[in-house]
Every structure is written in C-alpha cells, then in structure tokens.
Amino acid sequence: MKISTQFNRFFFGVVIKQIKELPQPLNYQNPFNGEMYEIDLSKVADDGIYQLFKLINPFYPKRGLVCGSTKNLSNKQMTKHIQWLERWIAFNGLELEYVSEEWNRILKDAGIEHE
C-alpha cells in the first residue's frame, strides 16, 4: 500500500512546515562516522528540504545511494521516517508543535493537568 494523500499532506503541510519554523541551526550527528554538523534549514529551499531529510535519515528506504520518492512509501515506512525526524528534533532539545499538542490532549483526556 502506498502512502495516502492525507498522510502526504500531513508530512508536507505540518511536519516539514513545523521543522522549518524551529530555531536554527540544528545539530546532526553522522551515524556512520560520528561527526557533528550544524544544519541551517532556513538556507535550504522549501521544495528541497524533504530531499535533505531523506539523505540524512540513515533508515530512509534507498536503492543504493538513491532515495525513493515519498509517494512510493507505505504508510508504515512514512511513519518511521516521521518518527526519525521527531527524534532528531528531540535530540536538539526541541519539540514539534503537533507533538506537544497531542501530548497535552492525551494528558487532558487522562485527567492530568499539564503546566
């Protein structure tokens, strides 16, 4: 099963948008050699930022060195890609707005007040 249109819209319209709005630069540690890099996403074109994310995610489906199209991913593969991005943001000490909103909703539904 390929990624749904709604999931694709969520990825590009929410996830990518909120990552671009974060304080820059973000730190990235290359998992293959351990080197640290600073990535300033404000300097990356809006239509190319998702390409960068495909390249730096070591678990993104690739054929050799060529990254596949997001529209050919399954919902499970796209979920894993988004989770990797969320963890990368968390390693930078930040949190995406939609993640914060969902946690607050869960806490509220559980009767726990969040400050």
Image (cartoon, helix red, strand yellow):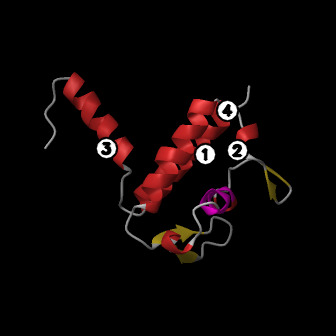
Q: Report which quarter residue 99 is drawn in.
A: top left
- Closer to the eye: label 2 or 3: 2
- Horizontally, is 107 left or right of 34 in the view? left
Q: Are marks 4 and 1 in contact (CB under 8 Å)?
A: no
Give the amino acid type for the residue marked by disc 4 in the picture.
Ile
- Horizontally, is 31 left or right of 90 in the view? right
Camera-nearest residue between 45 and 57: 45
* Magenta segment boundaries in residue numbering: 48-54
Report the disc number at residue 70.
Answer: 2
Of marks 4 and 2, which one's residue comes earlier in the chain?
A: 4
Residue at the extreme right of the image, as rendered: 64
Secondary structure under tag 4 reads loop
Residue 79 appears anywhere in the view: no
Mark pair 3, 4: CA separation: 24 Å
Report the disc number at residue 3.
Answer: 4
Within 10 angstroms of label 2, few (less than 14), some, or many (20 or more) residues? many
Q: Report which quarter residue 74 is drawn in.
A: top right
Mark pair 4, 2: CA separation: 8 Å
Within 10 angstroms of label 3, few (less than 14), some, or many (20 or more) residues? few
Residue 26, given in percent of the width and then of the height, sits at 46, 69
Mark pair 1, 2: CA separation: 10 Å
Of marks 3 and 4, which one's residue comes earlier in the chain?
A: 4
The residue identified by callout 3 is: 100
Q: Residue at x 38, y 50 (%)?
A: 96
- Horizontally, is 10 left or right of 77 in the view? left
Q: Residue at x 33, y 35 (%)?
A: 102
The residue identified by callout 1 is: 81
Mark pair 1, 3: CA separation: 19 Å
Give the amino acid type for the residue marked by disc 2 in the picture.
Thr
- Closer to the eye: label 1 or 2: 2
Q: How many marks?
A: 4
Q: Residue at x 23, y 23 (%)?
A: 109
